[in-house]
Image (cartoon, grey):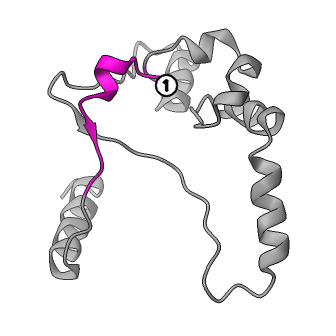
Amino acid sequence: MLQAAARAEESNNGVKVAYSIPKEGTAVWFDMLAIPADAKNTDKAHEMLNYLLRPEVIAGISNYVAYANANKASTSLIDEAIVNDETIYPPEDVKQNLFSLKVLPKKIDRVLTRLWTDVKANR
């Protein structure tokens, strides 16, 4: 969303992209790294994850993409504008109304995927 907002501002065509969390709350989203169960080189995969979790490394990533990360030790290394942006790092009262989505039965998940595809395709 932040990249879309930046591109809209750069275009200088009057389009404004903004993001807000409803006061009632919403589903929290997150990026995740995982090692597949059948991975051939799990030692190297763990090395990569450990590298990414270094405060200076994950802070650099957050500074580049303007995404929050959960590594508290990196917070002091992240640009103040990012850390203080409540759309990136919501305050505690907002976080209290965020929730994780439950895993749905495959049949329901397929219906939702089709509906979302229709929305994206403007059908």
Q: Residue farthest to the front?
A: 73
What residue is at 51 percent from the left and 14 percent from the top? Answer: 85
- Reply above or below: 54 against 122: above
What residue is at 77 percent from the left and 21 percent from the top? Answer: 77
Circle 1 Cα neighbour tier, 10 Å, few/some/many (<14 / 14–19 / ≥20)? some
Residue 40 in magenta stretch: no
For label 1, the residue is: 88
- Which image quarter: residue 111? bottom left
Residues 3 and 76: in front is 76
Give x and y (percent) for residue 91.
39, 17
Residues 111 and 86: in front is 86
- Which image quarter: residue 98? top left
What residue is at 28 percent from the left and 58 percent from the top? Answer: 121
Q: Is residue 4 something that shows in the picture?
A: yes
Give x and y (percent) for residue 54.
80, 42
- Which image quarter: residue 6? top right
In the displayed structure image, the side of residue 68 where residue 97 appears, left or right? left
What residue is at 65 percent from the left and 89 percent from the top? Answer: 38
Quadrant (top left/top right/bottom left/bottom right) for the C terminus: bottom left
Bounds of the magenta span? 87-101
In the displayed structure image, the side of residue 112 where residue 67 appears, left or right? right
